[in-house]
Amino acid sequence: MPSLVFFFEVHQPYRLRKNIHVKLVEKALKGRLEVKDVEEAIFDEELNKYVLNRVADRCYIPATKIITENIERYKNTEKPFKVTFSISGVLLEQALKWRRDVVEVFQRAVDTGMVELAEQTYYHSIVAFMPGYGFDELREQVLEHRKIIQELFNYNPVSIENTEFTYNNDIACFFNNMGYKVMLTEGVDWVLGWRSPNYVYKTRDCDIRVLTRNYRLSDDVGFRFSDRKWDQYPLTADKYASWLSATPGDVVFIAIDYETFGEHHWPETGIYEFLKWLPGEIRKHQNLEFSTPREVVEKYPPRDVYDVPPWATISWADERDISAWLGNELQWEAFKALTELRPFVKALNDPEITKLWKLLTISDHFYYMATKFGSIGEVHAYFSPYKNAAIAHGLFMEALSALIVKIAEKIKEKPREILARLVVPENKAFHFNLSTGEYTGLSARSIIEFLNTLDKAPLESILFHLNRGDIEAWIRNVFFLDELALAIEEIRKEPLDIMEKVVKLKKVIRDWIEG
């Protein structure tokens, strides 16, 4: 009896304001710009509120009520109706701010006991791909999502998706180490080969289970439902149920954007009626049952390995890769600039700065920068509030510049305290080598770590780097501390033996840290 898993992605981003500079000037004229002022100037609250209200009225409220009614109707039968929701933290955040009834309607659905909630990143972000910081930031955002799901729904997810079903072996094993049982992703043809998406798989290097989306059956509803040119139009509940019944395998994983119901396909298309009658039509087929990711991985053993190396990451968007967000120079430039700010944000440890930076990690910002053509380009244009990718990129960099100004101001307030905490990425770390070029195995990613490592590093290595000016160059170029760099340069020039230079070097750095 094949298990049907219906999964709904629920997410709305914070969109950037089209006149960021004007708003910043307006607020600056009223006095000193605080971080909250910058956030309000960057994000278009009016547009975000309007979109949330529209989608709440067209989709979230009516569709969830239909689902809950069906759950209650069949709850005490042999084939209870079950669904899975993955709700981003930023969607819940906006709902709590402007539409509390959206949260309440999801709470009522979860309270039936027939709804599974899947984990994702709070900001629906692509931080997993940040060089040097990806998994650290990924963990933070997943834990933040876990917290809001626990607070609002008293629920602890065991299934998880990375944003937009992005997946590779490393990400899967990372989530396995966090304790999740199943990861949700796309059934990509080139990964599956001759195999079917309709089975439970496991990843290559660990034991986490993998569910792969049946994209053909999913897209029949998500994309083609209201397409009058489609040779299967109109798609009725009984027709779709018959397709599901005829599908071989252990599990049929149907995953779509929740906005399919009423927003992407308007109520006039009959999408509400489709959703209303589908569970009943499915129940007419004896070989079908409803299930959730948690249940199917406990019921079915993995049939094979789903092997996706990190250099071939997949997703459910566009060409089933990550080019929807990181496929051109505009996107990579913006992503790199955002990534390089993270160590400064962490060193500041300012909740408002941190929040603003994390809001800029939302994947949609990069999705709007895509420069694609044909039907794929049309999908990007449909979702984007901007005329083209260049405008989206320009606004993002403008927003990032405003954040950089605030970060610089905060650092100037307490430079020693903040820069002493600054941990740079591995590619900017100081590596201790011998004069022969041999690596000692020691490195430092912060000034404090460098000071501590001086006690472990061979004297030959310290002298080698000191005489070449490497230490002062690292301090100046990575941390922008000219004063400290000059003090180290003076030590290098003094006629002292190596032990005296090391002692003096430690003292200069320690005195700087302590102020």
Image: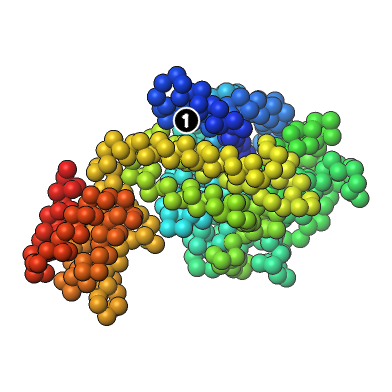
Q: Is residue 260 above or below residue 442?
A: above
What residue appears at the point 86 percent right and 43 percent down from the top-left corner? 227
What residue appears at the point 69 percent right and 67 percent down from the top-left corner? 190
Q: Nearer the viewer, residue 280 or 340?
A: 340
Whether residue 162 is visible to the viewer of this picture, yes or no, is no
Name the amino acid type tagged 1: Val
Is 74 placed left or right of 507 in the picture?
A: right
Q: Nearer the viewer, residue 362 or 348?
A: 348
Q: Position of residue 287 (x, y in %)?
A: 76, 53
Q: Position of residue 416 (x, y in %)?
A: 24, 43
Could you say whether the residue bearing mark 1 is in a helix, strand or loop? helix
Q: Position of residue 454 (x, y in %)?
A: 18, 63
Where is the C terminus found, in terms of image quarters?
top left
Q: Nearer the viewer, residue 44 or 63?
A: 44
Quick one: which residue is furthest to the top in this view? 30
What residue appears at the point 76 percent right and 52 percent down from the top-left corner? 373
Whether residue 429 is visible to the viewer of this picture, yes or no, is yes
Residue named by callout 1: 38
